[in-house]
Image (cartoon, helix red, strand yellow):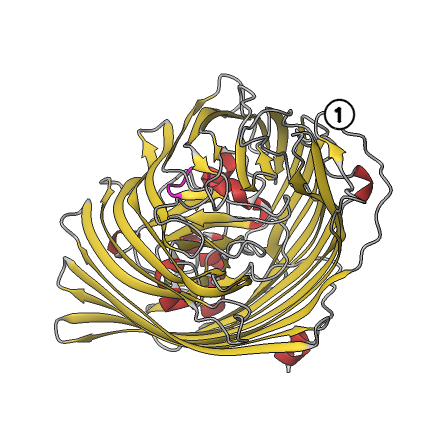
Amino acid sequence: MLLAQLSRARRRAPFSFQPVVPDLRPVQARSLRPVAALMLAMSGLAEAADTTEASDITLPAVSVVGTASASYNPPDASGATRTDTPLREIPQSVRVVPRAMLDDIAATRFAQTFDYVSGIARQNNFGGLWDNFAMRGFTGHENTGAGYLVNGFAANRGYTAPMDAATIERVEVLKGPTSSLYGTSEPGGTFNVVTRQPQFRPAQRYGFELGTRDGYRATADVTGPLGENVAGRLIAVADHQGSTRDYINSQRYLVAPSFTWTLGNDTVLQYAAEFQRYTTPMDRGVVAVNGQLGRIPRSRFLGEPGDGDMRLDSQSHQLSVEHQFSQNWKGRLGLSYRGGALTGHSSEATSLAADGRTLWRQRRYRDFQSDDVSLQASVTGKFSTGPVGHELLMGVDAYRFGNTMAILRKNPSAAAPYAIDIYDPAYGQPAPPMPWNMDTYERQRNLGAYAQDQLSLGERWRVLAGVRFDAFDQSLDNHLRGTRTTQHQNAVSPRVGVSYLASQNVSLFANASQSFRPNAGADAAGLPFDPERGRAVEAGIKFDSEDRRSGATLAIFEIRKRNVLATDPSDPSFYIAAGEARSRGLELDVAGQLGTHWRVSGSFALTDAEITQDTRLAAGTPLSNVPRTSGSVLAVYEDAAPVGQRYGVGAGLRYVGRRPGDVQDSFSLPAYVLVDLHGYWQYSRNVRVSLNVGNLFDKTYYASSYSSLWIAPGAGRSVRLGVQLSY
């Protein structure tokens, strides 16, 4: 009944909320009464509990958040295998960005969390309206952004504002195909964002921040018990940010409540929501004149200030229950709903006249709405067959996604160019009338079943084998043309990997896997496209220090993707599934604690991503926005303060190499190096002061682009001063 009610929810949601699925892990609690034991384990006080009973019991516990750990090297990532497997035993390249690192760099957006991870490249972000990235060279659809997960649920199928970092506990970067567990996805990999959970120990944290360009931000994070077996958490954000860009600023309002119930000895239920409103003008950036950047200042806005803001309202819910059947078997059921709406006017560049200064523009009005309902059920168990240990995971999941797109658009013409002079812009032109351009409703349904076994062969060998079966249905109603196209696809996505634990510090791994992603629409004959298929192989080595506080992963990989949409040679107004692309490279990630004073993170990537077959582009054309080389270094030094308790100072350096600016490689985005400074002073147990400087040398750079007419300049120097109060 709840599933049906959610699917009928009104698409135009007033806010956005985010589901939060718990990370439930067994913990040993010695000699405790059941409910009290769980509550104390969750609040970190189990060792102080009553010890009058004599037996040991295993209880399901919720991963909770207290103060951030100083470690940059977490030991596990539940999203990689959907089980509690140490990272060193997983035959896959996985990087975890913990809350400690987000606090050190004062991250406020999800997009900042992967600045210090290898192989991630920023992509066209739809005028600043959503998160988009490429991992190992491959990205999602240009009109929806790349997909990622929040607590194991797909989170970016519809219209969601750029994710705020206040709700994030850690980000798990899962390299390579993930279709064997999660279904449709890009073969380069994905993110699993783990959100902050309620805890039974009362805590309050309030943050206030002032920044350059009229920036200010206020946050509140309150958690604690609501009863004997119920805990709650409430996170709220009010954020206003200016910009290096003329006429551009953004506002965000977010409320995220969550609750945890312990039902008896072995069952935990969790619910979380997020409501969000995000407003900002559509900003397509600057233009390249004859392929050259820098002809106009990075601040120059080429739209119309009178268009006002685009508005994103979204909401999300996650409800899950996990039950421990026995010491070795547990089950989980999860339900997620996400709804979103995007509305607003924009004026966007379409062509640059031969004089090199007159920019023709089109005016648009968008009204996009989406609903996404997902259901997951799984069982995990541990057992042995002779000398071989098994951790078996079996599950089914399904989703139903609806997407409405309505666009009014007026294209420029010689009689009505709706133009602007890029060197001497005059704003306030009369807005042209806009006829209907698009009115569609897309529906997707997917049913998947998967199985995975992790085998322990003695002390040193680990084998992971899994396979997933998907049945996918899609329909697209074009209300303007009065047509409907449908397709049904089946996919099988296997993966296999092997790890060899060479010593207590070193492990070797290798894996092979496949992925799929459906292609929307139909060809000239009205037939659906075959889905994109990906194949990947990877091998590497992992290192952990003796104390497990530092680690490194070095990996090489090759990925091939086929059935990429390419222009139909016989009718350029249609596509055919005939393209192919390939990415291969080397990646290094290092993170951890050095001695008692230093926290460090480093990354390097060498990525060779190119078209291997296309009807328009020559083989060997590099993929847009993907640098061949990139790297980063972050170091933070901490010590006792002469006044107060502690202080920390640090710096980050990020390098991004030269990249193609569009799919034709007709121009390039230049390489750049950015330097950031970070510092804090822990005045007392309750008061912390922070100072962060972004882009210290005010470097002009270009973060991403879609074409020579839509190029996004990066942010200039910013200074932020913050105060955090904790109780």
In this rendering, position of residue 484 left or right of residue 600: right
- Can you tell which quarter of the image residue 57 is in? bottom left
The one nearer the camera, 162 or 621, is 621
Q: Is residue 645 placed above or below 436 in the rendered structure? A: above
Percent x, y of residue 105: 50, 33
Q: Can residue 666 be seen in this view?
A: yes
Give the residue at x 76% y 45%: 309
Span of residues in magenta: 115-119
Q: How many marks?
A: 1
Instruction: Check the image and report above or below for 419 versus 152.
Output: above
Q: Which amino acid does label 1 sit on?
A: Asp
Residue 49, magenta (yes or no):
no
Identify which residue, 50 or 474, lies in the foreground.
Answer: 474
Q: Where is residue 714 in the image (x, y as percent from the top left)?
A: 57, 32
Q: Which residue is drawn at 70% across and 73% down?
A: 481
Question: Principal SS element in the magenta part?
Answer: loop
Quarter of the figure with the C terminus: top right
> Badge 1: how crowded within 10 Å, few (<14), some, or many (20+)?
few
Q: Name the residue under label 1.
A: 424
Q: Residue furthest top?
A: 642
Q: Which residue lies furthest to the bottom in this view?
A: 1
Question: Image quadrant of residue 18?
Answer: bottom right
Q: Can residue 327 be seen in this view?
A: no
Q: Quadrant of the N terminus?
A: bottom right
Question: Image height check: is 333 above or below 295?
Answer: below
Q: Residue at x 38, y 43 (%)?
A: 119
Q: Position of residue 416 (x, y in %)?
A: 80, 44
Q: Report helix, strand or loop for mark 1.
A: loop
Residue nearer the viewer, 456 or 509: 509
